[in-house]
Image (tube, grey):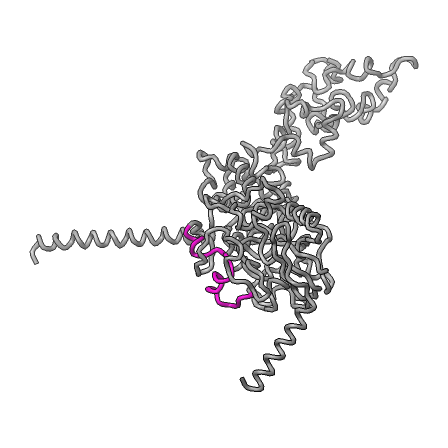
Amino acid sequence: MKRGNIFAHFVPLSLLLLCCTLAMGGTTGGKESNDKMGFIGALTCKDCHEAQYNSYAKSIHFKKSIKGPQSQDACETCHGAGAKHVEKGGGRDVDIFTFDKKKDPKEKSARCLTCHQRTPGMDLWEMGAHNRNDVSCDSCHELHAGVTQKPKDPEVCFGCHRDIKIEANKRSHHPILEGKVRCSSCHAPHGSLSKGMVRADDPQQLCYKCHADKRGPAAWEHPPVEEDCQSCHSVHGSNHARLLNERIPQLCQNCHDWSRHPGTPYDNKATFSSRWDCLRCHPSIHGSNSPSGGGMRHVR
Amino acid sequence: MSHKKLATFLFLLIFGYVASADADPPYTDPATGMEFVPVKGGCYQMGDSVGDGDPNERPVHEVCVTDFSIGKFEVTNGQYKKFRPQHNSGDSQGSTLNNDNQPVVNVSWEDAVAFAKWLSQKSGQSYRLPTEAEWEYAARAGTNKSRFWGDSPDDACKYANVADITAKKQWAQWTAFSCDDGYAVSAPVGSFKPNSYGLNDILGNVWEWCEDIYNSEAYTKLPKNNPVFSGSGEYRVMRGGGWSNGPLGIRSSHRVGLSPNFGHHALGFRLVKAAQ
């Protein structure tokens, strides 16, 4: 066979091989569509669930700029294939996945994590206290309604953490109700390695994030400041001034006995009151840098 | 005619006369023209006796119902509009559901009960929704198969308006019967063959509200005679399947619970007239 003839055969054969390869690629594509067997499309869902569809259409999940389920089979991305559900005429939980209260929380969250596994902040979800205590994503997030799907903080948190809601309503409180700080300012609801799911290695370090002036180091440290702010403060709220656990002097007297000076000052007519509390003479209670002995006693 | 055949003919004639003599005669409501077919009471095996159903259709259990009369057809738009002239059954993706002879849809359970109450007052009769037990007894018409017409899938389109080849032209992803009934959406009532009790569209065309509160375990809780679940529950029962449902939804024992204030494009009702 001449060289020219070989070339003349090689080109059509190559094209044939290419076509076969493309055809096989097409088969792979066909497999993908087979994986979605039983999907019936969002418009069919809308026929019966118009309100849900409309609220979903307003949500961030529907935004085309967001990578996610917005597509022909949008509803089924989360609820699963709907063909059997439609064939049977619907009904709650009939061959469809719903986010009902009775459903296994971990099963519900797993649906969300299909996409949100890599969402920032979700790395510690599995070991977080919420997940371990069967709090699922839909406990806090509205899956359809809302532009952002972000839960209302603190209202959603207070739904379960009633004790904290009470504390936050006390006379002296972090400005949670005022909207100046949010629960999520201090806590990581999607999981944290720290106690109380705080956004720091420990609660102490968390306080220092805002109250850096209390961090020290100081020449004369007040040990509880280093150990635990909560020795003296109720962090969410208190009926005593400055979120203190007790009023002064009782709070101080929990540790300090009368060995240095009496619990009542100087005569029986005067008391430690708001005018004459411990801090009147020991204002540098979080730590003093005074070189004198007064610093040691946090007097200055 | 041989003696044997003559004897059989006479027996059936006499037996049929005796059986029908106990039931009410057919009745036509003067206000709406609604036809009611008398159904002689009896006992039957209620539930999924075939094994193709959902857990809420089990256990199969014997149920007995007393005589009643049931609408030969589903309540139509024309009949319902005598009660609420402004009602619009709407359309489904461009196909109307609002013709006078089509079954009324987009009515809630509450709407259906209100209609029965209105018609009872207007006609001096006692109308209500059928109980689940009555509905299934009427739908089975003495049969114990999944559907009263038997096992042949193609027969579905002779007896019922279901998700079919015509519907699949519009909704390609639906699971449908492999026959063609000629209707994509609801058909005029009575377009298909009735069951042996003379009831048209008892399966297919549109779902039908029942009286009972839905309970997935109702069959373990109810008495044998004239059962109706009236315990706690947020849903009401619908039966029969509609024009958008495939084989799994078009079965005599299939039951679904829906919110009583919910209505959709394939859900209507038919009435029962209490025996005199």
Q: Quadrant of the C terminus of chain A?
A: top right
Question: Which stretch did the figure color magenta?
Answer: B148-169
User: Residue A208 in magenta?
Assistant: no
Q: Position of residue A265 (x, y in %)?
A: 87, 15
Residue toward you, B152 or B24: B24
Q: Position of residue A156 (x, y in %)?
A: 65, 34
Residue toward you, A160 or A127: A160
Please tell me in which quadrant of the rendered image residue A174 appears: top right
Residue A276, compared with residue A105, is above or below; it is above
Q: Quadrant of the N terminus of chain A?
A: bottom left
Q: Position of residue B267 (x, y in %)?
A: 57, 50
Q: Residue at x 72, y 16 (%)?
A: A284
Q: Is residue B56 visible?
A: no
For the view shown, which residue lies furthest in the left direction?
A: A2
Q: Is residue A90 visible?
A: yes
Please tell me in which quadrant of the rendered image residue B3 appears: bottom right
